[in-house]
Amino acid sequence: MESLQGHLLVASTALRDPNFFHAVVLLVRHSDEGAMGVILNRPLEVRLREVWKQVADVECRRNDLIHLGGPCEGPLMAVHDNPVLGESEAPAGVYFCTDRGSLEQLAADVECQVRFFAGFSGWGPGQLEGELAEGSWLTLPAAAAHVFAAEVDLWDRVTREISGRKILDALGIREVPPDLRAN
């Protein structure tokens, strides 16, 4: 099994689970034991400051929307760009954490890029691989630009990116300049 940690799972039109309709999931863990990720494009109408007093006694300087990470219950968690506070890295330059002390520091830091999540997406051993084989998910190596991009139209944008990569692969084109007019 090849790990997809640090990849995006993009719900295909064949995926019928309403929890994942047009979802873009960042996989933060993937091994023989299963997979775990957070949905990047499900902002809730709840701001971090509104729930922070239930989490910690320290000041919260951020007023970010909390995102629904998935249908599984879990602790408050975050993906961010601070390597000191990361428990794991997926993809390069993007870190994941659930540690209370790290979350407190992230809530007080208005300079870093961060997304907070309630809940997560989880798969048991072999479950995600089965869904991939059924065509329920498309995959794409993630980048910080995907993770911290605006949620609006994220599914459309990454779906187009995947389609473009498939066309280039089919044509045998390995590198494309950032600006095609320079070609």
Image (tube, helix red, strand yellow):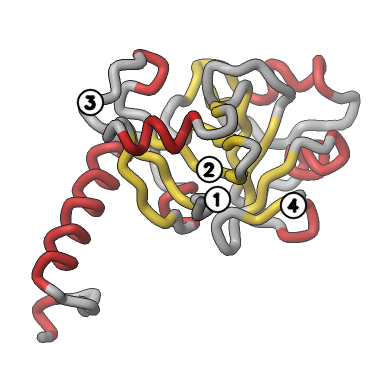
Mark on residue 14? 3
Circle 4 residue: 86
Residue 108 is situated, as x and y percent measured from the top left of the image, at 77, 41
Where does residue 79 sit, x and y in percent of width and height? 62, 44
Mark 4, other Cα within 10 Å: few <14 / some 14–19 / many ≥20 = many
Q: CA distance from mark 3 to mark 4?
A: 34 Å
Kind of residue at disc 4? Gly
Relative side of 139 to 37, left or right: left
Please count the marks in the image: 4
- Looking at the image, do the residues carrying marks 1 and 2 touch, with CB atoms under 8 Å apart? yes
The quadrant of the picture occupied by the C terminus is: bottom left
Asked if residue 163 is positioned above or below residue 75 in the image, the reply reads below
Q: Quadrant of residue 75?
A: top right
19 lies above or below 124: above
Residue indicated by mark 2: 27
Q: CA distance from mark 1 to mark 4?
A: 15 Å
| CB within 8 Å, label 3 to label 2 | no
- Determine which quarter of the picture holds residue 57: top right
**Could you tell me how far apart the alpha carbons at marks 1 and 2 are, in whole angstroms?**
5 Å
